[in-house]
Amino acid sequence: MQELFQVIKDSSAGGVSQSPLQIVFNLSMAMILGLIYAYVYRLTYVRKKTDKVMKQEMINIQYTLLLLSIGGAFIWIVVADNLVRAFGLAGALSLIRFRTRVKDPSNTIKVFYAIIIGMSCGLSQYYAAIIGTVFMCFVLTVIYYIKAHEKKMKLLSREKGLSPKNDDDED
């Protein structure tokens, strides 16, 4: 038990572990990668863009992805390797309650990934942040083309009368 108290005492003694320039660079990197990620998200969004509700959700999530990337970086800049700050931040964040329901479950994963981009930038893991962002954008693009191909195949099979039209199909 004494060791636990010593760890907590030692962790609260440290100040900011990054220079102001490093902090600005980390947040800028998170913003740039968040913008790229949000842009690819918008390009690869496969739901109907004509539905006003879904279009508004797409726009909102696009901005959320950007803000979460920057927020994730800022969280890790603040917490750094300080145990007391980490527990304090966890307590403060537990007070936040999200009431907005995300209609597309894949958007939840995309939001989660934006936080990871920010975390990696906040921890100065730039290679991981850049490679991870490029890879995730590639995966989003592949999924987009797979879904576009599936949609095209459904339309062709409907035209040939091979399958009845299903009203529950997502376009």
Image (cartoon, rainbow, N blue to C red):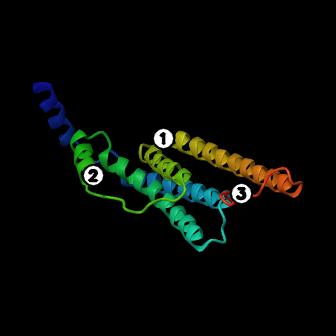
- Which three-letter amino acid code belongs to the residue tagged 2? Ser
Instruction: Say which element carries label 3.
Output: loop
Query: Which residue is label 1 attached to?
Result: 125
Q: Residues within 10 Å of mark 2 (few under 14, many from 20)?
A: few
Q: Secondary structure at mark 1?
A: loop
- Residue 15 visible in the snapshot: no
Secondary structure beneath label 2: helix
- From the image, which quarter does the C terminus lie in? bottom right
On screen, residue 3 above or below 56: above
Q: Measuring from the top left, give residue 100's x and y in whole percent.
A: 41, 63
Q: Label 2 vs label 1: CA separation?
A: 26 Å
Of the residues shown, which amino acid type is indicated by label 1? Gln
Mark sitting on residue 166: 3
In front: label 2 or label 3: 3
Is residue 111 found left or right of 89 in the rendered image?
right
Residue 4, image x, y percentages: 16, 29
Q: Earlier in the sequence, mark 2 or mark 3?
A: 2
| N-terminal label among 3 and 1 | 1
Q: Nearer the viewer, residue 38 or 81?
A: 38
Q: Residue furthest bottom?
A: 52
* Front residue (pair 140, 39): 140
State the image coordinates of residue 67 (x, y, percent, origin top left): 46, 60
The crowding category of the residue bearing disc 3, from other C-alpha atoms within 10 Å (few below 14, some 14 to 19, many at least 20), is few
Residue at 57% of width from left, 42% of height from top?
A: 132
Q: Which residue is mark 2?
A: 94
Q: Nearer the viewer, mark 3 or mark 1?
A: 3
**Nearest to N terminus: mark 2 or mark 1:** 2
Left or right of 136, for residue 27: left
Q: Which mark is residue 136?
A: none
Say which residue appears at 46% left-offset and 44% top-offset: 120
Q: Amino acid at mark 3?
A: Asn
Spatial separation of the CA atoms under disc 2 and disc 3: 42 Å
